Structures are given as C-alpha cells and as structure tokens.
Image: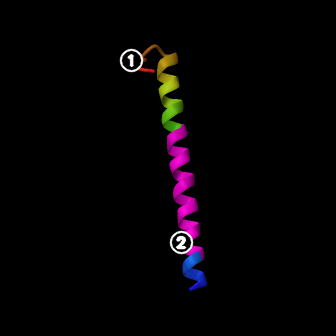
Amino acid sequence: SLFVREGIVTAICLFDTLRRIFWSTSVLLRIYRCLKGECKEI
C-alpha cells in the first residue's frame, strides 16, 4: 500500500513537471515568433 501511494505521488509530480515544461516551452515559442515578427496575438 505504501508503494502504491508513493507511486501515485511520483506520477503526479512527474505530470506536474511535464506540464510546467510544456507550458514554458509554448510561452518561449510564442515570444520567439513575436521577436521574428510573426506575432498575431499577445
């Protein structure tokens, strides 16, 4: 039972980290496009 709980916590932490990385990457891509002059929103 302890292993199951730790596995769930680890999975949640990994998912949250991936979500943050994905969000940061999309923001950086949007800024990069704006710097290149392809910006349509912001």
Could you say whether the residue bearing mark 1 is in a helix, strand or loop?
Answer: loop
The residue lying at 54 percent from left, 80 percent from top is 4
Choose between 41 and 33: the one closer to the eye: 41
Choose between 26 and 13: the one closer to the eye: 13
- The amino acid pointed to by label 1 is Lys
Residue 28 position, x and y percent, is: 54, 31
Write down the residue under mark 2: 8
Q: Residue 10 in magenta?
A: yes
Secondary structure mostly seen in magenta is: helix
The residue mark sitting in front, 1 or 2, is 2
Q: How many marks?
A: 2
Magenta stretch in the rendered image: 6-24
Image quarter for residue 41?
A: top left
Above or below, 25 against 16 in this view is above
Image quarter for residue 5?
A: bottom right
The residue lying at 51 percent from left, 49 percent from top is 19
The residue lying at 47 percent from left, 22 percent from top is 33
